[in-house]
Amino acid sequence: MMNPWRLRLLSQLDTLGTVRAVAHAANMSPSSVSQQLAVLESETRTQLLERTGRRVRLTSAGLILARRARALLGHMADVEAELRGFGEEPAGPVVLGAFQSALHTMAVPAVTRLAAAHPQLDIQLVQLEPHESVPALRVGEADIVITTTDFDEQPLGDDLDLVPLATEPVLLVVPPDDPAAGRGGADLAAYADHAWSFDMPQTYMANLALRLCRQARFEPRVACRFGNYMMALQHVEAGLSVALLPALAVDQRYRVATRELATPVTRTITAAVRCGSPPRAAVRAVLDALRTGPGTGLPPTPPAAVVPAGQDAPAAPSAPDTPDTPDAEDVRDEPPT
Protein backbone atom coordinates (compact mmCIF):
# COMPACT_ATOMS: atom_id res chain seq x y z
CA MET A 1 0.00 0.00 0.00
CA MET A 2 1.28 3.47 -0.87
CA ASN A 3 2.25 5.72 2.02
CA PRO A 4 0.38 9.09 1.96
CA TRP A 5 3.38 10.93 3.38
CA ARG A 6 5.60 9.69 0.53
CA LEU A 7 2.89 10.60 -1.97
CA ARG A 8 2.98 14.15 -0.59
CA LEU A 9 6.75 14.29 -1.17
CA LEU A 10 6.24 13.16 -4.77
CA SER A 11 3.51 15.77 -5.26
CA GLN A 12 5.80 18.47 -3.85
CA LEU A 13 8.56 17.41 -6.23
CA ASP A 14 6.17 17.90 -9.14
CA THR A 15 5.31 21.40 -7.88
CA LEU A 16 8.68 22.62 -6.55
CA GLY A 17 10.92 21.01 -9.15
CA THR A 18 13.94 19.90 -7.12
CA VAL A 19 14.68 17.47 -4.30
CA ARG A 20 16.46 20.25 -2.42
CA ALA A 21 13.33 22.45 -2.54
CA VAL A 22 11.17 19.56 -1.32
CA ALA A 23 13.63 18.89 1.51
CA HIS A 24 13.51 22.53 2.58
CA ALA A 25 9.70 22.56 2.54
CA ALA A 26 9.46 19.29 4.48
CA ASN A 27 12.25 20.17 6.93
CA MET A 28 14.23 17.12 5.84
CA SER A 29 17.62 16.51 4.30
CA PRO A 30 17.80 15.99 0.51
CA SER A 31 19.16 12.47 1.05
CA SER A 32 16.18 11.58 3.26
CA VAL A 33 13.76 12.82 0.59
CA SER A 34 15.56 10.74 -2.04
CA GLN A 35 15.41 7.67 0.18
CA GLN A 36 11.68 8.07 0.77
CA LEU A 37 11.01 8.50 -2.94
CA ALA A 38 13.02 5.35 -3.62
CA VAL A 39 10.84 3.50 -1.11
CA LEU A 40 7.76 4.80 -2.93
CA GLU A 41 9.13 3.38 -6.17
CA SER A 42 9.49 0.01 -4.43
CA GLU A 43 5.93 0.24 -3.08
CA THR A 44 4.52 0.98 -6.52
CA ARG A 45 6.96 -1.30 -8.42
CA THR A 46 7.25 1.53 -10.94
CA GLN A 47 10.05 3.85 -11.97
CA LEU A 48 8.89 7.29 -10.87
CA LEU A 49 12.14 9.25 -11.18
CA GLU A 50 14.93 9.54 -13.72
CA ARG A 51 18.26 11.27 -13.26
CA THR A 52 19.45 13.97 -15.68
CA GLY A 53 22.93 15.07 -14.70
CA ARG A 54 22.85 16.07 -11.04
CA ARG A 55 19.09 16.51 -10.95
CA VAL A 56 16.12 14.17 -11.01
CA ARG A 57 12.84 14.58 -12.79
CA LEU A 58 9.58 12.69 -12.79
CA THR A 59 8.92 10.02 -15.38
CA SER A 60 5.56 9.93 -17.14
CA ALA A 61 4.35 7.49 -14.49
CA GLY A 62 5.72 9.76 -11.77
CA LEU A 63 3.87 12.77 -13.17
CA ILE A 64 0.59 10.86 -13.30
CA LEU A 65 0.99 9.55 -9.76
CA ALA A 66 2.05 12.97 -8.40
CA ARG A 67 -1.03 14.67 -9.79
CA ARG A 68 -3.40 11.89 -8.76
CA ALA A 69 -1.77 11.94 -5.33
CA ARG A 70 -2.66 15.61 -4.93
CA ALA A 71 -6.34 14.79 -5.41
CA LEU A 72 -6.11 11.74 -3.12
CA LEU A 73 -4.44 13.69 -0.33
CA GLY A 74 -7.01 16.44 -0.63
CA HIS A 75 -9.82 13.88 -0.37
CA MET A 76 -8.22 12.31 2.69
CA ALA A 77 -8.00 15.73 4.33
CA ASP A 78 -11.67 16.33 3.55
CA VAL A 79 -12.67 13.00 5.12
CA GLU A 80 -10.61 13.71 8.25
CA ALA A 81 -12.17 17.17 8.47
CA GLU A 82 -15.67 15.74 8.15
CA LEU A 83 -15.02 13.31 10.98
CA ARG A 84 -13.68 16.12 13.18
CA GLY A 85 -16.52 18.42 12.22
CA PHE A 86 -19.47 16.36 13.50
CA GLY A 87 -19.73 18.67 16.49
CA GLU A 88 -19.92 21.72 14.17
CA GLU A 89 -17.48 23.58 16.43
CA PRO A 90 -14.48 24.92 14.44
CA ALA A 91 -11.40 23.15 15.78
CA GLY A 92 -7.98 21.93 14.78
CA PRO A 93 -5.01 23.41 12.92
CA VAL A 94 -5.26 26.04 10.19
CA VAL A 95 -2.19 27.51 8.49
CA LEU A 96 -2.91 31.07 7.35
CA GLY A 97 -0.38 32.75 5.06
CA ALA A 98 -0.47 36.47 4.33
CA PHE A 99 1.71 39.16 2.84
CA GLN A 100 3.38 41.60 5.21
CA SER A 101 0.85 44.45 5.37
CA ALA A 102 -2.14 42.08 5.51
CA LEU A 103 -0.60 40.26 8.48
CA HIS A 104 -0.73 43.44 10.56
CA THR A 105 -4.10 44.72 9.47
CA MET A 106 -6.16 41.63 8.59
CA ALA A 107 -4.69 38.37 9.83
CA VAL A 108 -3.66 39.27 13.39
CA PRO A 109 -6.97 40.99 14.26
CA ALA A 110 -8.94 38.04 12.84
CA VAL A 111 -6.87 35.49 14.77
CA THR A 112 -7.27 37.53 17.95
CA ARG A 113 -11.06 37.45 17.65
CA LEU A 114 -11.09 33.75 16.76
CA ALA A 115 -8.98 32.87 19.80
CA ALA A 116 -11.78 34.15 22.02
CA ALA A 117 -14.70 32.81 19.94
CA HIS A 118 -13.27 29.37 19.07
CA PRO A 119 -10.56 28.36 21.54
CA GLN A 120 -10.21 24.93 19.92
CA LEU A 121 -8.82 26.49 16.76
CA ASP A 122 -5.04 26.30 16.37
CA ILE A 123 -4.08 28.97 13.81
CA GLN A 124 -0.50 29.28 12.62
CA LEU A 125 0.37 32.57 10.90
CA VAL A 126 3.05 32.56 8.21
CA GLN A 127 4.35 35.57 6.27
CA LEU A 128 4.08 34.67 2.60
CA GLU A 129 4.40 37.31 -0.08
CA PRO A 130 2.24 36.90 -3.22
CA HIS A 131 4.99 35.13 -5.17
CA GLU A 132 5.30 32.59 -2.32
CA SER A 133 1.75 32.11 -1.08
CA VAL A 134 0.04 30.47 -4.05
CA PRO A 135 2.71 27.75 -4.49
CA ALA A 136 2.53 27.09 -0.73
CA LEU A 137 -1.25 26.77 -0.92
CA ARG A 138 -1.10 24.39 -3.86
CA VAL A 139 1.34 21.98 -2.18
CA GLY A 140 -0.58 21.98 1.11
CA GLU A 141 1.83 24.10 3.17
CA ALA A 142 -1.00 26.57 3.84
CA ASP A 143 -4.76 26.14 4.18
CA ILE A 144 -5.66 29.77 3.41
CA VAL A 145 -3.58 32.58 1.93
CA ILE A 146 -4.24 36.29 1.68
CA THR A 147 -2.89 37.38 -1.68
CA THR A 148 -3.68 39.62 -4.63
CA THR A 149 -5.37 38.88 -7.93
CA ASP A 150 -3.19 41.48 -9.66
CA PHE A 151 0.16 39.65 -9.67
CA ASP A 152 0.48 38.77 -13.35
CA GLU A 153 3.60 36.70 -12.76
CA GLN A 154 1.72 34.39 -10.34
CA PRO A 155 -1.78 33.89 -11.80
CA LEU A 156 -4.55 32.30 -9.77
CA GLY A 157 -5.87 29.28 -11.64
CA ASP A 158 -9.18 27.47 -11.54
CA ASP A 159 -7.73 25.06 -8.96
CA LEU A 160 -8.29 27.76 -6.31
CA ASP A 161 -11.41 29.27 -4.78
CA LEU A 162 -11.34 32.98 -3.96
CA VAL A 163 -13.04 35.08 -1.27
CA PRO A 164 -12.75 38.80 -2.15
CA LEU A 165 -11.67 40.90 0.82
CA ALA A 166 -10.96 44.47 -0.28
CA THR A 167 -9.39 46.84 -2.77
CA GLU A 168 -6.74 49.39 -1.78
CA PRO A 169 -4.95 52.14 -3.70
CA VAL A 170 -1.26 52.08 -4.52
CA LEU A 171 0.25 55.37 -3.31
CA LEU A 172 3.36 57.39 -4.01
CA VAL A 173 5.14 57.84 -0.66
CA VAL A 174 7.38 60.90 -0.40
CA PRO A 175 9.27 62.75 2.38
CA PRO A 176 7.07 65.07 4.47
CA ASP A 177 8.72 68.20 3.04
CA ASP A 178 8.18 67.18 -0.60
CA PRO A 179 7.16 70.40 -2.46
CA ALA A 180 4.38 68.62 -4.36
CA ALA A 181 2.81 66.94 -1.29
CA GLY A 182 -0.91 67.63 -1.14
CA ARG A 183 -1.17 68.81 -4.75
CA GLY A 184 -3.44 66.03 -6.01
CA GLY A 185 -2.66 63.11 -8.27
CA ALA A 186 1.04 62.43 -8.76
CA ASP A 187 2.66 62.17 -12.18
CA LEU A 188 5.47 59.66 -11.70
CA ALA A 189 7.46 61.27 -14.51
CA ALA A 190 8.01 64.25 -12.18
CA TYR A 191 10.00 61.92 -9.92
CA ALA A 192 12.23 60.46 -12.63
CA ASP A 193 15.34 62.11 -11.10
CA HIS A 194 14.61 60.91 -7.55
CA ALA A 195 16.15 57.91 -5.82
CA TRP A 196 13.65 55.09 -5.33
CA SER A 197 13.07 52.51 -2.62
CA PHE A 198 11.99 49.14 -4.06
CA ASP A 199 10.85 45.80 -2.72
CA MET A 200 13.03 42.73 -3.35
CA PRO A 201 13.47 41.61 -7.01
CA GLN A 202 10.63 39.66 -8.65
CA THR A 203 8.15 40.43 -5.88
CA TYR A 204 4.71 41.82 -6.64
CA MET A 205 5.44 45.41 -5.56
CA ALA A 206 8.90 45.50 -7.18
CA ASN A 207 7.48 44.37 -10.51
CA LEU A 208 4.53 46.75 -10.26
CA ALA A 209 6.71 49.76 -9.35
CA LEU A 210 9.12 49.05 -12.20
CA ARG A 211 6.25 48.67 -14.66
CA LEU A 212 4.63 51.96 -13.58
CA CYS A 213 7.92 53.85 -13.82
CA ARG A 214 8.56 52.52 -17.30
CA GLN A 215 5.02 53.44 -18.34
CA ALA A 216 5.95 56.97 -17.23
CA ARG A 217 8.93 56.69 -19.63
CA PHE A 218 11.85 56.54 -17.22
CA GLU A 219 14.07 53.91 -15.65
CA PRO A 220 14.04 54.33 -11.85
CA ARG A 221 17.31 54.83 -9.97
CA VAL A 222 16.92 52.21 -7.24
CA ALA A 223 18.75 53.37 -4.12
CA CYS A 224 17.70 50.48 -1.87
CA ARG A 225 15.68 47.28 -1.74
CA PHE A 226 13.89 46.17 1.41
CA GLY A 227 11.67 43.18 2.10
CA ASN A 228 10.20 45.14 5.01
CA TYR A 229 7.90 48.10 4.40
CA MET A 230 8.96 49.75 7.66
CA MET A 231 12.54 49.97 6.42
CA ALA A 232 11.28 51.53 3.18
CA LEU A 233 9.20 54.06 5.13
CA GLN A 234 12.18 54.94 7.33
CA HIS A 235 14.30 55.51 4.21
CA VAL A 236 11.65 57.79 2.68
CA GLU A 237 11.14 59.62 5.98
CA ALA A 238 14.86 60.43 6.02
CA GLY A 239 14.53 62.09 2.61
CA LEU A 240 16.69 59.46 0.91
CA SER A 241 14.12 58.09 -1.55
CA VAL A 242 10.51 57.92 -2.69
CA ALA A 243 8.47 54.72 -3.00
CA LEU A 244 5.30 53.17 -4.35
CA LEU A 245 3.45 51.29 -1.60
CA PRO A 246 -0.04 49.87 -1.10
CA ALA A 247 -2.14 51.88 1.35
CA LEU A 248 -2.09 49.14 4.01
CA ALA A 249 1.70 49.33 4.16
CA VAL A 250 1.82 53.03 5.10
CA ASP A 251 2.36 53.00 8.86
CA GLN A 252 1.18 56.28 10.35
CA ARG A 253 4.05 56.33 12.85
CA TYR A 254 6.39 57.45 10.07
CA ARG A 255 6.53 61.09 9.00
CA VAL A 256 5.89 60.66 5.30
CA ALA A 257 3.42 62.15 2.83
CA THR A 258 1.32 60.11 0.42
CA ARG A 259 -0.09 61.03 -2.95
CA GLU A 260 -2.57 59.16 -5.06
CA LEU A 261 -1.42 58.55 -8.62
CA ALA A 262 -2.71 60.71 -11.47
CA THR A 263 -3.85 57.47 -13.09
CA PRO A 264 -5.16 55.50 -10.08
CA VAL A 265 -3.77 52.01 -9.49
CA THR A 266 -5.39 49.60 -7.04
CA ARG A 267 -4.54 46.24 -5.53
CA THR A 268 -7.32 43.68 -5.09
CA ILE A 269 -6.89 41.61 -1.93
CA THR A 270 -8.41 38.15 -1.75
CA ALA A 271 -8.29 35.06 0.41
CA ALA A 272 -7.65 31.84 -1.50
CA VAL A 273 -8.22 28.19 -0.64
CA ARG A 274 -7.81 25.00 -2.64
CA CYS A 275 -10.97 24.17 -4.53
CA GLY A 276 -12.89 20.91 -4.16
CA SER A 277 -15.08 19.97 -1.27
CA PRO A 278 -16.55 22.76 0.88
CA PRO A 279 -13.94 24.08 3.34
CA ARG A 280 -13.93 22.36 6.73
CA ALA A 281 -15.44 24.19 9.67
CA ALA A 282 -12.08 25.55 10.90
CA VAL A 283 -11.16 27.00 7.49
CA ARG A 284 -14.63 28.46 7.03
CA ALA A 285 -14.43 30.18 10.42
CA VAL A 286 -11.14 31.84 9.48
CA LEU A 287 -12.50 32.94 6.09
CA ASP A 288 -15.56 34.46 7.74
CA ALA A 289 -13.40 36.30 10.28
CA LEU A 290 -11.19 37.73 7.54
CA ARG A 291 -14.13 38.82 5.42
CA THR A 292 -16.50 40.32 7.96
CA GLY A 293 -14.52 41.36 11.01
CA PRO A 294 -13.76 44.91 12.08
CA GLY A 295 -10.24 46.18 12.63
CA THR A 296 -8.78 45.00 9.33
CA GLY A 297 -7.95 48.53 8.22
CA LEU A 298 -10.39 48.20 5.29
CA PRO A 299 -14.19 48.29 5.17
CA PRO A 300 -15.76 44.82 5.57
CA THR A 301 -17.14 43.28 2.41
CA PRO A 302 -20.78 42.20 2.21
CA PRO A 303 -21.57 38.48 2.58
CA ALA A 304 -20.44 36.56 -0.49
CA ALA A 305 -19.88 32.97 -1.46
CA VAL A 306 -16.51 31.50 -2.35
CA VAL A 307 -15.87 32.35 -6.02
CA PRO A 308 -13.89 29.95 -8.26
CA ALA A 309 -10.79 31.65 -9.62
CA GLY A 310 -11.88 31.15 -13.21
CA GLN A 311 -15.04 33.23 -12.68
CA ASP A 312 -15.54 36.96 -12.19
CA ALA A 313 -15.55 37.87 -8.50
CA PRO A 314 -17.86 40.53 -7.08
CA ALA A 315 -16.13 43.83 -6.64
CA ALA A 316 -14.77 44.51 -3.15
CA PRO A 317 -15.09 47.95 -1.56
CA SER A 318 -12.35 50.49 -2.09
CA ALA A 319 -9.94 51.29 0.70
CA PRO A 320 -9.83 54.75 2.28
CA ASP A 321 -6.84 56.91 1.38
CA THR A 322 -5.51 56.66 4.92
CA PRO A 323 -6.61 53.36 6.49
CA ASP A 324 -7.23 53.00 10.19
CA THR A 325 -4.21 51.50 11.88
CA PRO A 326 -4.36 49.22 14.94
CA ASP A 327 -2.40 50.27 18.00
CA ALA A 328 1.31 49.70 17.55
CA GLU A 329 1.72 47.63 20.67
CA ASP A 330 -1.03 45.25 19.54
CA VAL A 331 0.07 44.14 16.09
CA ARG A 332 3.17 45.95 14.84
CA ASP A 333 6.86 45.40 15.22
CA GLU A 334 8.84 48.24 16.69
CA PRO A 335 10.40 50.48 14.03
CA PRO A 336 13.93 49.53 13.03
CA THR A 337 16.67 51.31 14.90
Image: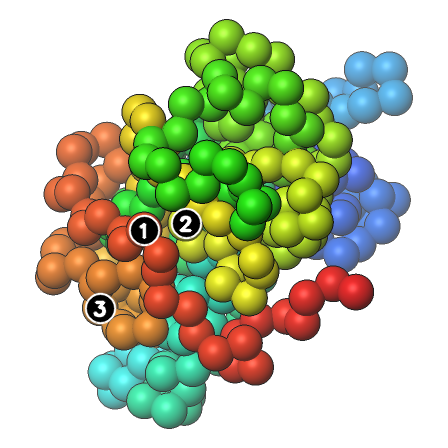
- Sequence-first tag of 2 and 1: 2
Q: Residue at x 32, y 89 (%)?
A: 117
- Image position of 151 (left or right of 133): left
Instruction: Residue 13: tell me if it is visible.
Output: no
Residue with the mark numbered 1: 321
Q: Residue flagged by tag 3: what amino acid is it?
A: Thr
* 98 relative to 183 in the view: left or right: right
Q: Which residue is mark 2?
A: 247
At label 1, which amino acid type do we have? Answer: Asp
Mark 3, Cα crowd under 10 Å, few <14 / some 14-19 / many 20+, is some
Query: Could you say where residue 122 lies in the image, as x and y percent from the top left?
Result: 48, 79
Image: 248 above or below 107? above
Density class for disc 2 (Cα within 10 Å; few <14, some 14-19, many ≥20) is many
Q: Are marks 2 and 1 in contact (CB under 8 Å)?
A: yes
**Residue displayed at 74% across by 63% down:** 336
Front residue (pair 179, 143): 179
Q: Tell me the distance, in whole angstroms, between the alpha carbons under discs 2 and 1.
A: 7 Å
- Element assignment for label 3: helix
For label 3, the residue is 292
Q: Position of residue 172 (x, y in %)?
A: 47, 37
**Residue 186 drawn at (x, y percent):** 40, 29
Given the image, on which type of amino acid does mark 2 rest? Answer: Ala
Residue at 19%, 50% in the rendered image:
317
